[in-house]
Amino acid sequence: MTVYQATASAPVNIACIKYWGKRDTKLILPTNSSLSVTLDQDHLRSTTTSRADPSFQKDRLWLNGVEEEIKDGGRLATCIKEMKALRKQLEEKDSSLPKISGFPVHISSRNNFPTAAGLASSASGFAALVASLSALYQLSTDASQLSLIARQGSGSACRSLFGGFVAWQMGERADGADSYAVEIAPREHWPDIHALICVVNDEKKGTSSTSGMQRTVETSPLLQHRIKHVVPERMAAISKAILARDFDTFARITMQDSNQFHAVALDTDPPIFYMNDVSRAIIALIVEYNRVAVANGGKLKAAYTYDAGPNAVIYAPKENIKEIVELIVKYFPQADKFKDPFELFGAAGVQGKVVEGFNEGVAKPYGVGAVKGLIHTRVGDGPRTLGAEEALLGSDGLPLKA
Amino acid sequence: MTVYQATASAPVNIACIKYWGKRDTKLILPTNSSLSVTLDQDHLRSTTTSRADPSFQKDRLWLNGVEEEIKDGGRLATCIKEMKALRKQLEEKDSSLPKISGFPVHISSRNNFPTAAGLASSASGFAALVASLSALYQLSTDASQLSLIARQGSGSACRSLFGGFVAWQMGERADGADSYAVEIAPREHWPDIHALICVVNDEKKGTSSTSGMQRTVETSPLLQHRIKHVVPERMAAISKAILARDFDTFARITMQDSNQFHAVALDTDPPIFYMNDVSRAIIALIVEYNRVAVANGGKLKAAYTYDAGPNAVIYAPKENIKEIVELIVKYFPQADKFKDPFELFGAAGVQGKVVEGFNEGVAKPYGVGAVKGLIHTRVGDGPRTLGAEEALLGSDGLPLKA
């Protein structure tokens, strides 16, 4: 008997122009366009196996081995239903195709990064879900069309359907048909963009982004100005900077937009805070690091950005990452040895230090654990279809043990 | 021989609608109007003695006993010069008046609150300077006219020329003649407004407000929207709320405007942060305290506001202050006994506690010292002319020892 099963992985993406605010909460249509860098799946990914089988009783899904309820009308149900509908269209056009669109599916998904890392897994997770179902159903649908479906799972998931540098065009239509992701440039265009993720210890769970962004839409006077006047300009300018591989402009806009996102969160009633004192200290370090570079006649060497949490993501050309790791470690000593995927450091490991001319007074050194970990990665590719040996479902249709 | 000398005190004011940004840095003309509550001089004040004497060599000024340089063309020199000019006009109109406008002055000024308290002393300081010179020169000039001069010393000083609830009208003229303070309502209109100042420990000196606000003017896209569209509406609404003694509206606008001021600071490039994790925890406590009140069918019971530093000022009707002190002390234990000027607590002192229904998880308790002190005060009156027994200059024209 044929087994209808496929496995795919999808990447994390971290926005440079931030998505914050929905104009339609059910369809997940944003109040502004956004733009992100897709990170390398070699380091951070969600992997998902989907199987369609007539013997299954119903659609079921496991996340990291734990079954999640697929609520009627919920985001998971919507994505699965839309993918089945695309398969059904194919089957209707080509009667030789097996009629698997009507079969219940079992889906097993895993993230290779711990939830405790504080990295949003919904973007890579929904992108991997859509990618694995697309492979299962052998759809020829293009990534932008698939991104329409991933978007309804989690807005920013639509951007994880592409590698490289990706824009989510907000669109105008009420049905959301023009609110999808497009590739601004593939990773090969600018592979030199690396990222250092600083996982910041968080004592307090912040406001969820879903509820937070709607409160901002309802109460922040500044958000309206951002949406109408600031973001459109920045989208055009940063896209141009990416095409020109102009890191200075890319970095400036990325930092400005991270700050503005947190500014409108703060302008919300009651206010929303995601950054803490450690986040702010990392900003001070990067501002000073850039100041020294500019004072020496150079350009910006790094850009920080913060999502809806205290973690910093620092984008920089590869050649600067070593200095940046040394800088962060100087102020935030690490409990664990730096995992050095690009072999920047020898056997001695990282020694904390600052570049010449750096004003060490811009931040105070913290103790071990304030920054819990550092992850070095880079711009990456879009979803990958994987071989059967990577499957996460056993022959019984249930999740394999990790 | 006649001694020409006068002493005056002036109050601190804390804005509800924040001043942030100058359209003219020399004349200190703001980009938006602002509004503040004058605090009671019985608790916090600057006191200044001015003496005019032909035997003095030059104008001299001592602040807390330490001589400050009066730089040519600087803010101190400007205020002294303008006050002398007003005296000169009087002398020209009435030849019977002693010609003291040409005499050098000695000025001694003291704040009764430690600089370490982190309270801006420039507002009360320049207001006391202008008030003491006005008394010395026996000017009949009204407070709004004097506020034009205090404004050139330190913008927010103009608001300390009045008691109660005070607006600084930004004005339109290039020469600043219409940029002065006016009284919205005297303290007697709404004496029930009390304030609790939480002095927050600050490990790092923030950006000075003078340089910070100009960076915001130059780089924040959101500031322009705030200036043009948000502040004018809020000025009208909060003035109306004050006249109606509507604490709910007063509190809502005060908190929103504090948040928006810090939002535009964050939208600055590089970003400016004044609040730290302790400031944010106090916000979380007040938000939860208000949430419980509203959930019980009531209205807002307290309003936080933050100037260019981490200290919280909490405005509330007097009847709520006891609960607020207990709440703050519960999360921020105090090294020193609460100085209880309104005798809210008995001999046992403050016991930290929360109101019924309060979700204690909104903030984590801190150790002793995170909030260094609590000052309970209330809305107060404008500058006072004091008797000779309060003078800060000795018969030799030099500052008396403290």
Image (spheres, coloured by chain):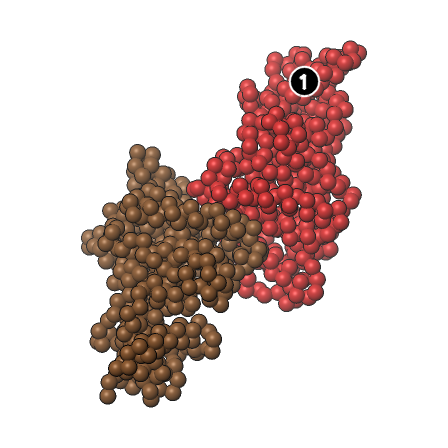
Chain colours: A brown, B red
Q: Position of residue A296 (x, y in %)?
A: 30, 34
The answer to whether residue B203 shows anywhere in this view is no
Q: Position of residue B357 (x, y in %)?
A: 63, 67
Vertical relation: B23 (above or below) B369: above
Question: Circle 1 sits in a helix, a strand or a loop, which is it?
Answer: helix
In the image: residue B191, left or right of residue A306? right
Q: Nearer the viewer, residue A25 or A102?
A: A102
Vertical relation: B297 (above or below) B391: below
Q: Position of residue A314 (x, y in %)?
A: 34, 51
Q: Residue at left 29%, top 59%?
A: A163
Q: Nearer the viewer, residue A346 or B108?
A: A346
What crowding class fits label 1: few (fewer than 14 Cα within 10 Å), some (14-19), or many (20 or more)?
some
Q: Residue at left 60%, top 27%?
A: B174
Q: Nearer the viewer, residue B334 or B6?
A: B6
The answer to whether residue B291 shows anywhere in this view is yes
In the image: residue A155, left or right of residue B241? left
Image quadrant in which you'd find residue B49: top right
Chain of the residue where label 1 is placed in the rendered structure? B
What residue is pinned by disc 1? B85
Vertical relation: B131 (above or below) A122: above
In the image: residue B140, left or right of residue B313? right
Q: Quadrant of the C terminus of chain B?
A: top right
Q: Residue at left 31%, top 48%?
A: A242
Image quadrant in which you'd find residue B32: top right
Q: Quadrant of the N terminus of chain B?
A: top right
